[in-house]
Image: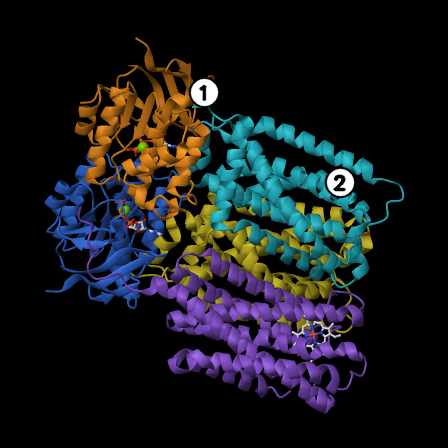
Chain colours: A cyan, B yellow, C purple, D blue, E orange
Amino acid sequence: MKRPSLLGAAWLVLKKDWQIEWRTRARLTAIIFFSLATLLLFSFAMGPDIVTLRAHAPGYLWLGLLFASVLSLGESFRVEAENQALTGLVLTPVEPRAIFIGKVLGNASLLFVLSLVLLPVAVALYDVDLGRDPLSLVLVLFLGCVGISAPGTVYSAISANARARDVMLPLLLFPVLVPLLLAAVSATKFTLQPDPQEQLGSWLKLLTAFDLIYLSVGFLLFPKVAEED
Amino acid sequence: MKRPSLLGAAWLVLKKDWQIEWRTRARLTAIIFFSLATLLLFSFAMGPDIVTLRAHAPGYLWLGLLFASVLSLGESFRVEAENQALTGLVLTPVEPRAIFIGKVLGNASLLFVLSLVLLPVAVALYDVDLGRDPLSLVLVLFLGCVGISAPGTVYSAISANARARDVMLPLLLFPVLVPLLLAAVSATKFTLQPDPQEQLGSWLKLLTAFDLIYLSVGFLLFPKVAEED
Amino acid sequence: MTPILPLVVLALVVAAIVGHVAVPAVRPWAWKAVGALGAAMLVSLWYFGLYWAPPEQFMSDVGRILYVHVPHVWMALLAFTLNVGCAVAYLMKKSWVTDALAESAAEVGVYFGAVGVMMGSIWARPTWGVWWDWDPRLISTTVMLLAYVGYLALRSFTEDPERRATWSAAAAILSYVSLPIVWFSVRWWNSLHQVQSNPSTVDKPMVAVLRWGAVTMLCFLFVFIVKRYEIARSRQTAAMELPPLEAPRAEVA
Amino acid sequence: MALALEALDISKRFGARWALSRLSFTLEAGRSLLLTGHNGSGKTTLLRLIATASFPTAGVLKVMGYHSQDEREALRPLVGLVSHASFHYEDLSAAQNLTLTAKFLGVEQPASVVTGLLDRMGLVARADSPVRQFSAGMRKRLAIARLLMRAPKVALLDEPFGELDPAGIAQMEGLIQELQRQGTSVVLATHLVEQGQRLTHERLHLEGGRKVTPV
Amino acid sequence: MALALEALDISKRFGARWALSRLSFTLEAGRSLLLTGHNGSGKTTLLRLIATASFPTAGVLKVMGYHSQDEREALRPLVGLVSHASFHYEDLSAAQNLTLTAKFLGVEQPASVVTGLLDRMGLVARADSPVRQFSAGMRKRLAIARLLMRAPKVALLDEPFGELDPAGIAQMEGLIQELQRQGTSVVLATHLVEQGQRLTHERLHLEGGRKVTPV
Ligand code: HEM
Ligand SMILES: Nc1ncnc2c1ncn2[C@@H]1O[C@H](COP(=O)(O)OP(=O)(O)OP(=O)(O)O)[C@@H](O)[C@H]1O
Ligand SMILES: Nc1ncnc2c1ncn2[C@@H]1O[C@H](COP(=O)(O)OP(=O)(O)OP(=O)(O)O)[C@@H](O)[C@H]1O
Ligand SMILES: [Mg+2]
Ligand SMILES: [Mg+2]
């Protein structure tokens, strides 16, 4: 009997979530169509001015991703709350940090896929120009998705056990995410529009810094929230 | 033993939800802070241009209400899904239509309170002018909240029992609500800004029509979804 | 277009589909005949639409996409109407027939609607200069499609057939509310998109070709729904049969 | 004599699996039925059908002469179910849960009835704790209290002894006998066969959703 | 001899209520303990403390010589719990649930081990059904299969007979004896006192979270 290593266990956690996802096939489909509806709603509520729309496209994109992430994070720990499965996992025993890594990877990859799906939609809806700096754009999306997932995983683990969890998650998460979101919106803007002062680089650095901070804080905190004490 | 009438039973359902709400005190607080965060996010993500912000304030307001309503509706049937409490209620027996009325009243009143709380916030963040036609504004908010709650109650009853329920609700609900939302945004706009062509009246009529349609459809449909068969 | 015409067409489609479902004798050949008719009409529509009809007054040749764009969207609306009819029928009296028919109508409707929107989008590029615009008609149509995608998602996420049928019937009825909005959106919100025009203000040949296109698409609508219905039924019947009265005897060693 | 239960060839399907297959049986009003069978043989499913929490896929089920689906409104006040799912609101206290039921039933003087029942089930000290904080046995006791308040004509008990302590089990047996004396038909699903047979008149043994003669 | 359990004045508080009050006891390795008490007396709470699913508010609990909170990483592989909460993933099948545990444990040849265990617990025919579709007893059987896979040194069984059919109960008794033969300390919480006493060496009776001598 050789127990898997930290990363091996994280991989098992990730695979398990994919199995569940595969059986229900619900989450990815649903959040894609949900964020489509959200993007449509934004522009619908904001009126038809195409110039404003194009200027605010990064904002809409990230807001859409943010709202989708709330749903997806909530769902990701709802399956752990049923039958106290998360406790079961910890008692198996699985290192809580492995669970954290697996969950962050799962949530971030789901969000990242979603963000890629939303790009062509943004072209159609907001008439943005993806061709300017596609590589940086993808990088920004990736960093942003990781940045949402790291604190999101910690908070959704908390709120999965708290009373009234559906409402707790965004309440805790949004304030923490505001700075990250600002950075992501600005960075995205400079990959879609001209960037005369070359600000993109510093935004990217800021994003990376956020990611690293959130990831390490989450890594340290998650064991505390995954276990009762 | 005199069983309560339809409205009496609806009132009991409503009171029960208030009792739960009072014990956890979570839902109202959480959705207020959630929509505050949302409104803040909007203004952050869209940049500091106060003229655009003011012009789009009705849109932001209703989007904030919409996202909050998804959380609040989900929570309102999460308590019914635990221990199959909704089935228990139906077997007590309580007429499903009484449950519908009670739930719609509860959800709509919660949303309405939220919308009133958000008004001063909108003044602070978007610099809107509430003094122009406050009565119509309140009427619009009220009609809009009822319009969100009626189909929302039906759909959250469905998705409380469906797989991946957190994601199903907005997926089903948003497309249905878009027309209502659009009408609400336009009507709100004309209570905050000059209305030279006197369009407010026709939007109010449209909103009322939506409410009546959704309420009666929901009233007829709810018994079908509340019971298994 | 007189307001009564769509209803007549709807009645005809329903009659044809019900006939096809109810009369086993026609099942093997009727859909093939209609399909063949549709194919033939499609070929001639090509000729009529691209050569025979006069170019559109403002849009010249680009306008010819009208002859497929409009029929597609019409068919979607028709299919969704059939869907809601079946949903109401199911809620009044449980029947696997109406459930299956509702499912096929919704799926075919989403197909026609999606193609119609795509064509509209292609059309918008040369005429309005953009792929997409913030226009109530376009958005309400797309949102209506999203509502039906949600409907189909609900169906596929629900395993229990009874629950699936009831829940999706409810969703169908709520989704259908968006249909009149699609129709009237051009009037309620002043929009870029064409308001419904009246045959009397449009060139006779154009009306004729448009109607020809509509009939062509009707043939396809019929074939698609009927075939999709058969698939839905065959999926159901596997689970519909009652278990045998006696337990299957255990193998005796 | 009138029939409490009349099952005419009822079947219940979940997905592609038949949980109950072509079950036919009758039970005279006032008599009690023991329901036995292996795990997964369909006992809970059958009880839920009788309670109108769910309906047969095929066949007709009549309870106290009412069609279980078409006349469910008239039937529901007459049946009561205690099952694996407890129907409690987790965030309401025991007393609030019971008072709610009492008000829906139109019971006069709900407060004293509720206190009486809580006292009887030994929950009076915890009357104001939310159900979320209850132990497994306390939840079961609360579910039984609710059943007693409803005073059903047909009482459906799904493993009522599970999770109860010895005193609770003895009390439960007494309650079943008391219900029977009041003319209630008890349908008792349990794995404690001897105990069950002592308390009931007839027995229905299920195997894979079918009625078989127990060996 | 080494001690399997050593409770030194442990207490557990939920909110303002003490579920366990100043409990002290020891259990020698290899010996088994019967846990009895009224509903709500703290049995489940105690088992969860031993399983490290939760930790004492005060006092020190040592399991197999390890401090239950500070050395929980070393302890966890040695204890196994079957309780009211089943720890299953509802949307995974029985086989997938077990395979997952097997992989986390690093079991060699997980597939054959899993099939063997499912066969033993009579679930092999339903190996690929999601747990959501299981009956109460089938869930219990799956939880027992998971415990067996873990082969713990201290097995914590919270009402293991509940929901099982007569064959399952007999099998469970056999399993407990088998575990004991392998040197496992079984802590058995059950309301079936005679049955429990037959299977265990010692008894701990709780009343309101305190240890009392049973009458
Ligand atoms: C991009 C998406 C588009 C969508 C979703 C859409 C949707 C619809 C719908 C639902 C109808 C049928 C209902 C009715 O007749 O009123 C329709 C008809 C029509 N559409 Fe579009 N459309 C789109 C783009 C366009 C464009 C770009 C044009 C031309 C510039 C156009 C011109 C027309 C015309 C002329 C009709 C027939 C109206 C009549 O005469 O009755 N559409 N469209
Ligand atoms: N919601 C459901 N979906 C699919 N299958 C189900 C569902 N509920 C029950 N079943 C299946 O129906 C069968 C009968 O289940 P039921 O719960 O009635 O058994 P039971 O006799 O009460 O068993 P137990 O003694 O374990 O409580 C089982 O095979 C079970 O898997
Ligand atoms: N999460 C919790 N919050 C508050 N109180 C709790 C919680 N869990 C248990 N309790 C309380 O602790 C006490 C002991 O509960 P426990 O579940 O351990 O009882 P038990 O002996 O297992 O009872 P049963 O025989 O009914 O299963 C009870 O009074 C219960 O109300
Ligand atoms: Mg059962
Ligand atoms: Mg217990």
- Give the vertical position of D191 relative to C38 (above or below): above
How busy is the neighbourhood of tag 1: few (under 14 within 10 Å), some, or many (20 plus)? some
Q: Residue at x 81, y 35 (%)?
A: A202
- Kindly identify which numbered label has been placed on residue A183: 2
Check if mark 2's residue and mark 1's residue have beta carbons within 8 Å: no
Residue D83 spot, x, y in % from top left = 29, 47
Q: The disc labelled 2 sits on which kind of residue?
A: Ala
Q: Is residue E26 left or right of residue B17?
A: left
Mark 1 secondary-structure assignment: helix
Q: Amino acid at mark 1?
A: Arg
Up the image or down, C211 lies above or below D122; here it is below
Q: Position of residue A117 (x, y in %)?
A: 66, 52
Residue B196 found in image quarter: bottom right
Q: Say which residue appears at 61% left-offset and 83% top-offset.
A: C41
| Residue B57 appears in view | yes
How far from the left and from the top, in percent, is residue D209? 24, 53
Q: Nearer the viewer, residue D125 or A111?
A: A111
Q: Give me the disc on residue E72.
A: 1
Q: Position of residue E56 (x, y in %)?
A: 42, 22
- Along the viewing direction, whichever of C96 and A54 lies nearer the viewer: C96
Q: Nearer the viewer, residue C4 or A9?
A: A9
Question: Along the horizontal axis of the image, is C218 left or right of D184?
Answer: right
Extreme right residue here? Answer: A196
The numbered mark at residue B97 is none
Q: Relative to E83, is D60 above or below?
A: below
Direction from residue B51 to residue E210 in the image, left or right? left
Residue at the front extreme, as displayed? C253
